[in-house]
Image: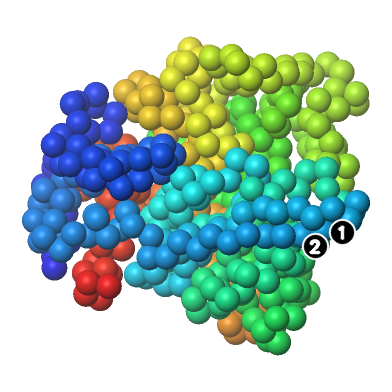
Amino acid sequence: MNLSAGGPIKLMIGTGDIVSSIVNEYMDYVRRRDPDQPEFHQAVEEVIESIEPVIERHPEMRASKIVERIVEPERVIAFRVPWIDDSGDTQVNRGYRVEFNSAIGPYKGGLRFHPSVNLSILKFLGFEQIFKNSLTTLPIGGGKGGSDFDPKGRSDNEVMRFCQSFMSELFRHIGPDTDVPAGDIGVGGREIGYMFGQYKRLVNRFEGVLTGKGIGWGGSLIRPEATGYGLVYFVAEMLGAKGQSLEGKRCIISGSGNVAQFAAEKVLDLGGTPISFSDSSGCIIDNDGIDREKLSHVMYLKNSRRARIREYLEKYPSATYIANEGNSDHNPIWNVDADIALPSATQNEINGIDAKNLLENGITCVAEGANMPSTPEAVEVFLSNGIQFGPAKAANAGGVAVSALEMSQNSQRLEWTREEVDNRLKGIMHSIHNAAAGTAEEFGCAGNLVAGANIAGFLKVAKAMSAQGVV
């Protein structure tokens, strides 16, 4: 099957056109089969809108039901996770692994531990992961998993017991050539360590089945930093395409975990100024700029003390703290004068009102560090007003890219230097930007990185699925 692009065609994302019959047909199919999965519907609709011209040009893809197959996970695993808390009481959580697509390599994607975890969220994340992983140029398929367990406020021993119970079921379904999970929200080095130890104990093998491991026992240098660094490298590529750089740019960053922290670090490296962080309780705005000393304090608060971001003001009282009101129709962190916005907290954190606030406050570039942090209404505002927009599946692919590099190092029993991994990461983000930008131009929508990333990622997976038959 020839899946090359043809001449220019009009794409619907960012144009405000009425959704076509093809999009409606596929979305009716998805909603009918999974009626209670809104996050999954949102992720699928964005991709389907982008790839509509590909489907129109290749009727053989409709005949072989490529789309119907790609929106259906190859495997969904759900299981109970019983464990004992420090009071001796039995707790029961629910665990999942969505093994979505292995057309181009073993399933690859994070594990999320958070009370909000459900099948809709994991399917949206796993679906996005298919195309994100495809864009990295590395041979990895898409998957996602996790649990509704909340590690916040739990002791190390409680987290260890939960992780051991979780892995006691998950180990049956994963392996270095089958499915290689990583971390995500609520799953950092501590949790990866406990899960890896239990996996090794159960299978009696030391192998690269999890990424994000510690240095000295299979981990890769730059892995904790990778998503944040990669996000900023992608922004540098976006700006470079316009003859600009990060030098002197003020950057709004949401979140305060690994992605946000290391995005701020790389912004500083490239001459920009981060001015904000947030967590579930609220956000801090420091108009004086967050320098390396202040960033180090944020890392201490969040990584060592696991404190709330509002405690930043105890040391730097000139900053402003705004509590999360919950019922507000907008997020105050996006109503600040700045040049660049890097949403790095969670899905749908920027709505249509937030996007308009960003536009009015001078934002010219938005790149997604979190997964699907912008609602469709927000994306429409960005694209229709000429704001440069880097979608998550392209902009935050650095994390999974370095996870795949960790897999390569594990397979070779090697450990690359920090400089080598960082250079490979920078090169991968350059390639992702070129693929998204080049495909967008090839399909007649130059500058639309949403469409470009979706089409480029889809074409690679669709070609592999076609070659492998109906499986």
| Label 2 element class | helix
Disc 2: CA contacts within 10 A as few (<14), some (14-19) or many (>=20): some
Number of on-image labels = 2
265, above or below 334, in the image: below
* 310 lies left or right of 336: right
Tell me how far mark 1 sits from mark 2, CA to CA.
Answer: 6 Å
| Display colour scheme | rainbow
337, above or below 64, in the image: above
**Quarter of the rendering occupied by the N terminus:** bottom left
Residue at 60% across / 16% down in the picture?
Answer: 327
Which residue reaches farthest front? 89
Disc 1: CA contacts within 10 A as few (<14), some (14-19) or many (>=20): few
Which residue reaches farthest bottom? 204
* 99 lies left or right of 447: right
Q: Position of residue 334 (x, y in %)?
A: 57, 21
Disc marking residue 384:
none
In terms of image quadrants, where is residue 285?
Answer: top right
* 234 lies left or right of 253: left
The three-letter code of the residue at mark 2 reads: Arg
Which residue is disc 2 drawn over?
161
The three-letter code of the residue at mark 1 reads: Asn
Which residue is disc 1 drawn over?
157
Q: Position of residue 109 (x, y in %)?
A: 53, 60
Residue at 58% across / 76% down in the picture?
Answer: 172
Q: Nearer the viewer, residue 218 or 252?
A: 218
* 34 lies left or right of 414: left
Residue at 81% across / 37% down in the picture?
Answer: 298
Residue at 32% across / 23% down in the picture?
Answer: 384
Q: Position of residue 441 (x, y in %)?
A: 24, 44
Q: Nearer the viewer, residue 214 or 240?
A: 214
* Tag 1–tag 2 contact (CB < 8 Å): yes
The answer to whether one can see residue 92 in this image is yes
